[in-house]
Image: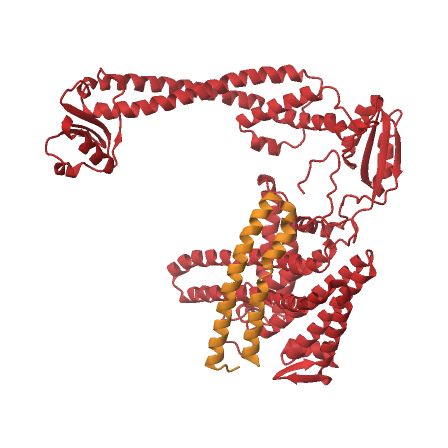
């Protein structure tokens, strides 16, 4: 599949941006979740769920990248 | 097996005389979850502990502190059965005498250690002054001089700046500085700036050297005394370790039994025990209590209280119960996901690793942990983890042999046009292995991704079906909502399949399962949109709107994201495979070079690299499959927040 250079650069920018955003968000939430779990271990499920919520950002970025590359 | 064990509430009423034997039998039975009696009123009070409870408790505390001081933690862990322990020995006296003897030694030890510490500091001081070489009188009694004694970090190089009128004696970092009185302030400030820490002479008279010798002799004496005491404690430890540990365990059990009545309700002459027991064990309970005089045992009907949860699964699935408990104890009324988890987890794990050679290594690792490691480490759940690992390894071998055709990153047969050249086993071994890979991890990356999405569709579909079953007990509205979500999921899945129908797996899925899709499509820009999907999403939304409100429409994006997050299965699989292939290429280069020295050195490096890839792969695969199950799968149906079944007689589990 031949990709134009502009598309390649666009995909790269997408992944970098969403990657940083997701990492930052999950870092903050993860730190807080770890603190909560130290005090109340039964909140592990909720904490874990909260922590992975920002995953949506990078997944949608991935979808965008694929769409750009293949369509 | 899809539900926790059925519990029945029972009540035991008996006269106070039978309390001891009842408690003893219940403790041995290890099947009754006792409900704490928490509302004393004018008719029922809290029970009193059995006779001797406070004395036993006291002895237990003493034993625990002794085992602490003698550092018996390892022995404590290893000693499982307390066969040597018997009630008839005069325990109390033995424990008290032992405690006295031990405390004597422990206190003496602490005292000597403290004295040693101060003596050693003193020695430091005296040594510094001895190094300066003058008796203590030299530092006092001047009328025109100010004396500074202490330690400097660096030398007093630029003291000339203040005045050239000074006399300094130094020894290592210790200095004694003599300056005219009038310069005292300035010199003092100068010294403070240079990091001077003052050290006063400890005495007014005398020769530091003599005192130093005395102190050193004293230190030697103290040290030898300390050795003596340590030896005595060592002897104590060898002689009494077993006694302390076994008695501690035995007493702990007795104290638990003796304090059990605090959980019961009692009147002046009788006691009442309220508890839960799995229905199938009720006859055993009756039999065990049958011989005790005056007891009344009966099942009680309650509708309001929720029973504690004890999961009930066939043995192969049992290790996965730990993963379910870890997320949250299931609620009594919902379906137990352990069985599904025990299929899906090894499946996903095997898909990610997908290499027969690594699979064998994983089984080996799991077996090693199972046999050796779990006894020496104190981690709970390690045994279950090892079993899960072994199961995962089996599936890795299956995937490695039949789907990917790989053994230690070298395929059985190479792909048709491959930019990667690691050869294949068929040409190395000279025989043509009858197993052909269906998918090449790196060549067929789009297929891997789509396969992950198919897995997502199936997995989340199962999740919603379980959700429907769970909600049906509560009310039709929420069950309908879950059904709606299931339909939305199907719609999204069909749409994704349509979009990717150009690829091999996509075409396979569409042609085999949904051939009608392609006939009803429109195009939005260049993206094919299936009308059937749109209808399904619409219908599903209508179904879940009443229960979850209009804001839930945004959740469709969340669901899409959940489905797509399964592409991590392909992602990790391909990434690990790529690294492994890279290492294999280096290995082949090294081997082909023919240089023996290079082979030996390279061998170590390659081995380390493989070990790293292996470990990282296993950890990543395990964590990601666990996360997919916990976050995406469980969230579709799990209620959780049940209470754990803690039978009387077994150690309390956290949770």
Residue drawn where x is 68% and y is 49% of the image: B328
Residue drawn where x is 19% and y is 31% of the image: B185
Location of residue B269 with respect to B303 vertically, above or below: above
Viewer-proximal residue among B597 and B578: B578
Residue B275: horizontal and vertical position, in percent? 81, 36
Residue B236: horizontal and vertical position, in percent? 53, 20
Q: Which chain is orange?
A: A
Location of residue B604 with respect to B495 vertically, above or below: above
Question: Hey, which residue is sitting farthest left in the picture?
Answer: B164
Q: In which quadrant of the rendered view does residue B505 lie?
A: bottom right
Residue B386: horizontal and vertical position, in percent? 63, 49
Q: Colour of chain B?
A: red
Viewer-proximal residue among B120 and B445: B120
- Quadrant of the drawing holding the C terminus of chain B: top right
Residue drawn where x is 53% and y is 69% of the image: B428
Image side of residue B472 versus residue B165, left or right: right
Picture mark count: 0
**Structure colour scheme:** by chain
The reply to whether residue B360 is visible in this rendering is no
Image side of residue B53 versus residue B294, left or right: left
Residue B493: horizontal and vertical position, in percent? 69, 72
Viewer-proximal residue among B55 and B318: B55
The reply to whether residue B653 is visible in this rendering is yes
């Amino acid at each position: 599949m031949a990709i134009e250079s502009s598309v390649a650069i666009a995909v790269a920018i997408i992944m970098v941006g969403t990657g940083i955003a997701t990492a930052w968000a999950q870092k903050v939430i993860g730190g807080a979740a770890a603190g909560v779990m130290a005090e109340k271990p039964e909140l592990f499920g909720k904490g874990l769920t909260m922590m992975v919520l920002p995953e949506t950002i990078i997944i949608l970025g991935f979808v965008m990248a694929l769409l750009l590359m293949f369509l | 097996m899809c539900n926790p064990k059925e519990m029945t509430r029972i009540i035991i009423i008996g006269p106070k005389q039978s309390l001891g034997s009842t408690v003893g039998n219940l403790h041995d039975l290890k099947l009754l979850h006792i409900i704490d009696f928490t509302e004393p009123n004018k008719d029922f009070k809290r029970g009193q502990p059995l006779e001797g409870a406070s004395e036993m408790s006291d002895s237990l505390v003493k034993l625990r502190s002794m085992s602490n001081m003698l550092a018996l933690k390892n022995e404590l862990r290893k000693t499982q059965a307390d066969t040597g322990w018997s009630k008839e020995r005069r325990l109390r006296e033995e424990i008290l005498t032992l405690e006295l003897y031990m405390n004597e030694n422990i206190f003496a030890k602490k005292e000597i250690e403290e004295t040693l510490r101060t003596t050693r500091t003193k020695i430091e001081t005296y040594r510094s002054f001895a190094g300066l070489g003058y008796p203590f009188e030299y530092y006092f009694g001047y009328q025109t001089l100010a004396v500074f004694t202490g330690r400097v970090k660096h030398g007093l190089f630029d003291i000339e700046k203040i005045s050239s009128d000074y006399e300094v004696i130094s020894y290592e970092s210790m200095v004694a500085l003599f300056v005219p009185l009038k310069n005292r302030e300035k010199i003092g400030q100068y010294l403070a700036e240079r990091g001077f820490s003052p050290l006063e002479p400890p005495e007014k008279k005398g020769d530091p050297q003599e005192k130093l010798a005395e102190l050193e002799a004293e230190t030697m004496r103290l040290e030898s005394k300390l050795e003596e005491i340590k030896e005595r404690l060592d002897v104590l430890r060898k002689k009494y370790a077993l006694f302390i540990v076994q008695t501690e365990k035995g007493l702990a059990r007795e104290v638990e039994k003796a304090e059990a009545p605090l959980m019961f309700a009692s009147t002046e002459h009788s006691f009442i025990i309220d508890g839960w027991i799995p229905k199938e064990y009720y006859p055993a309970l009756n039999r065990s209590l049958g011989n005790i005089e005056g007891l009344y045992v009966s099942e009680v009907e309650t509708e309001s209280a929720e029973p504690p949860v004890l999961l009930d699964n066939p043995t192969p699935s049992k290790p996965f119960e730990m993963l379910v408990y870890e997320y949250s104890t299931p609620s009594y009324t919902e379906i137990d996901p352990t069985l599904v988890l025990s299929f899906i987890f090894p499946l996903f794990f095997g898909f990610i690793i997908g290499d027969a050679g690594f699979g064998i290594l994983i089984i080996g690792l799991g077996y090693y942990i199972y046999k050796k490691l779990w006894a020496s480490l104190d981690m709970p759940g390690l045994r279950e983890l090892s079993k899960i690992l072994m199961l995962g390894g089996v599936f890795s071998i299956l995937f490695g042999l039949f789907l990917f055709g790989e053994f230690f990153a070298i395929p059985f047969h190479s792909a048709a046009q491959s930019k990667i050249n690691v050869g294949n086993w068929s040409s190395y071994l000279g025989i043509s292995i009858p197993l052909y890979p269906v998918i090449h991890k790196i060549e067929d990356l789009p297929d891997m991704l789509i396969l992950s999405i198919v897995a997502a569709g199936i997995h989340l579909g199962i999740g919603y079906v379980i959700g429907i079953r769970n909600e049906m007990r509560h009310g039709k509205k929420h069950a309908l909502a879950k059904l709606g979500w299931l339909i939305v999921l199907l719609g999204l899945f069909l749409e994704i399949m349509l979009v990717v129908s150009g690829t091999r797996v996509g075409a396979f899925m569409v042609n085999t399962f949904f051939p009608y899709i392609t006939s009803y499509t429109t195009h939005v820009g260049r993206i094919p949109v299936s009308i059937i999907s749109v209808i399904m999403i619409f219908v599903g939304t209508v179904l879940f709107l009443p229960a979850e409100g209009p804001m839930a429409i945004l959740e469709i994006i969340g669901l899409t994201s959940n489905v797509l997050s399964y592409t991590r299965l392909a992602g990790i699989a391909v990434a690990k495979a790529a690294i492994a292939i890279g290492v294999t290429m280096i290995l082949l280069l090294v081997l082909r070079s023919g240089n023996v020295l290079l082979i030996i050195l390279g061998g170590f490096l390659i081995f380390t690299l493989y070990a790293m890839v292996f470990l990282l792969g296993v950890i990543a695969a395990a964590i990601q499959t666990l996360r997919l199950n916990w976050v995406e799968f469980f969230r579709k149906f799990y209620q959780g927040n049940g209470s754990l079944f803690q039978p009387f007689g077994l150690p309390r589990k956290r949770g």
